Image: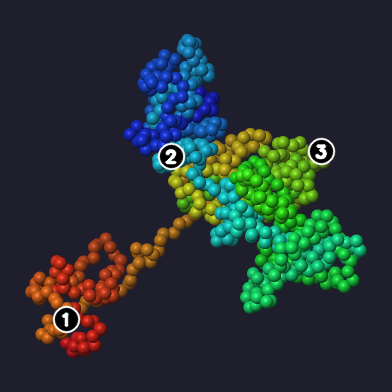
Amino acid sequence: MAVTMALEESTSDSKLHKDSASKKELRPLSAVSYSKSEHGPETSSSVEQLKQYKSWVSNERWNELKKIADTAMKENKVFMIKCGGFSAVRRALLQRGWVEKYESHKVRHPPPNVDPKRVSGKELTKVERMILFKFMEHHSVDFLWTTKRDRYDWLLSNKEVIISRFCRSIFTTKEGLTASLTQMHWYTDPGTAVTNFPRCYNIHNSDNLEEFIEDFRITACISLAKWFCKTYQSNSDQSLLTNQGKVPFSAVEFAINRMNEFVSFHSHKDIDETEDQVQHIWEHEWDQFLTHHYLLVHEKAKFVANINVNVKHLEKRAGRALSSIKTFWPQIDIDGVLNIWIVKPGNKCRGKGIHLMNNIKDIIGLLNIPAQKNRYVVQKYIENPLIIYNTKFDIRQWFLITNCQPLTIWIYKDSYLRFSSQIFSLSNYHESVHLTNNAVQSKYKNTGDRDKALPDENMWDCHTFKAYLRQIGKYELWDTKIYPGIKQCLIGAMLACQDSMDKRQNSFELYGADFMLTEDFTPWLIEINSSPDLAPTTSVTARLCPQCLEDVIKVVLDRRFNVDADTGTFELAYKQIIPKAPAYLGLSLCINGKRLHKKQYRERKHEHKNLTPFAPRVNTDDIIQDTLQPVPPEYSGPIITDFITWLNPYDTLPTNKDSILLGPKESLTDPRKTRKKSRI
């Protein structure tokens, strides 16, 4: 039985160990405990335990296993897969001559009371696995594939170990991504890095909570103005008002005034306004307006008929206010008219705890729940998503980071779409309508009203999506707008998050990003996930996930030793160029110029009397002369010592070994000394 076939049949793992016992005291206790076998007699040494297993295999097989282990350790080809699974990674490494080291508590001892000569199959595989483990017990692995972060931080001291995780990736949490992308405007580079990210707030922070409240209110003003203009243009003014109306036209006036004030503030036209000219809006006025907005937009209420209001003129004013605020409100197109926000727990995944809300009091009420442990983020919901056959979808895009300094990003050219099981509707806030990730949709059955062209598994690959774009006459948009937009979003986001990334070399990580498309086919980044689901849950993922993992190994290992190696479907999307520090920074500060030499003058006969006592004058042979020192040959830059001497001339006066002046200190600012020097 070949060892490759035996190793492929198992999904168990092994722990890591240091190279020598002399370094054990430097490791955390958790790492030391991992090196102890949790099965069998702990008092026996590795050599004694190996003797127990030698009778289970032939001498030829024993020598073969020993040679396999020695070669793997010598060539640094020992790997470990933590948390099970990932058979595609295991298969790719075994094909490249790597040997897997298993976890000690998962490596079983030979079954007792069994004749070794009759053992075969899986039992023999366990024995060979144990033999290999004992051969490599004190050898640290060279490649670690894990889905954990905390337990392997001690490995960072060994810089040669290749690890499939970065120690820090705060952008993989909703809270961390929101905090990181607040600075993304500094990294915007048209054509390279442009991140479309719906505005988001960490509302557990008091400052962010105030910003969210202001955003919610201005969004409500914009939404009401958009709804008013759209309704008036599609119908007549008679459809807006009735004698039994509940909302006065002053609500539209209020929205227009707040929008104009917003534009005036951001265009700095309010600088010269005095305090008396600034109109203060009270909290109860905002509450009243938000109530009116909800009645009109959500409850389909009507305006109170008023003959003193020119509805047409009011509509034109609202249109002008919308036109002027577009410059300062770049996400106006995704806002819609309902002012819907999506509330997410900041550190949860798989769609847990996510709600859609349109009432600010309900959103803020989440912070006041007793014993509340979750820290929520609030993100503007995209109210104009691109839908396929009246069904919402998102795009899961894999990307790989192989270095954080310089930043190196690889993007997988194949992606897949995830559909909702229900018909899309902005009036139904149920998770089955709006949350398209597979963990949520797997709990629901597809509604019978869905179009038959939609997949039963609720997944398409990108090639099927391209075929759909061709069908609707938009085939070119994938290569010209959608895929380039996804790349630019990821590059911009990673540049904004770079300062918070782990700078460890020999680390890499595969991430899964979720994107939404708006009606104009613009991709918007929603969130970034660590440890993306790579299970073969559908026929689409069963084909894409193993191939993606195989291509990860190609990028991480094959290209490490051959820059021209095949990288599969991964594309190098961005490689950061870090320029060298210019010569005028830090210790390289220099002054360009030519050295000046003073003439040697004879000693003057008449010395200026000074009250300060000086040591008796000595012979000139004993004076420490300020001679010109030769410049070292390896240094070709300018010399700055003469400039410092010119700034502080007292340092050039002769002294003895006790730093006592050997002559009077003449004033350099005395005009008599200056005239005397000029006559010499």
Q: Looking at the picture, does residue 295 appear above or below residue 92?
A: below
Q: In this view of the protein, can residue 602 be seen by the observer? A: yes
**Three-letter code for the amino acid on which mark 2 is drawn:** Trp
Tell me the residue that label 3 is attached to.
Answer: 448
Kindly indicate the quadrant of the structure image that contains residue 374.
top right
> What residue is disc 2 on?
154
The residue at 74%/42% (across/down) is: 432
Rendered residue at 77%/42% (across/down): 422
Please indicate whether residue 620 sits to the left or right of residue 443 in the image: left
* Disc 1: CA contacts within 10 A as few (<14), some (14-19) or many (>=20): few
Amino acid type at circle 1 is: Leu
**Closest to the observer: 616 or 497?**
616
Q: Earlier along the polypeptide chain: callout 2 or callout 3? A: 2
Label 3 sits on what residue type? Answer: Gly
**Location of residue 459 by image quarter:** top right
Q: Residue 142 sits in which quadrant?
A: top left
**Going 53% across and 34% down the picture, which residue do you hit?**
89
Indicate whether 227 appears above or below 63: below
Between 597 and 41, the one nearer to me in the picture? 41
Q: Position of residue 47 (x, y in %)?
A: 36, 21
Q: Mark 2 Cα within 10 Å, few/some/many (few <14, many 20+)? A: few
Q: How far apart are the two marked residues, 2 and 1, measured between alpha carbons?
A: 69 Å
**Quick check: 499 left or right of 347?**
left
Instruction: Determine the residue positioned at 65% across, 46% down.
Output: 370
Of badges 3 and 1, nearer the viewer stands: 1
How far separated are the C-alphas under marks 2 and 3?
53 Å
Q: Earlier in the sequence, mark 2 or mark 1?
A: 2
- Left or right position of 472 against 580: right
Image x and y of residue 20, in percent: 35, 33
Earlier residue among tags 3 and 1: 3
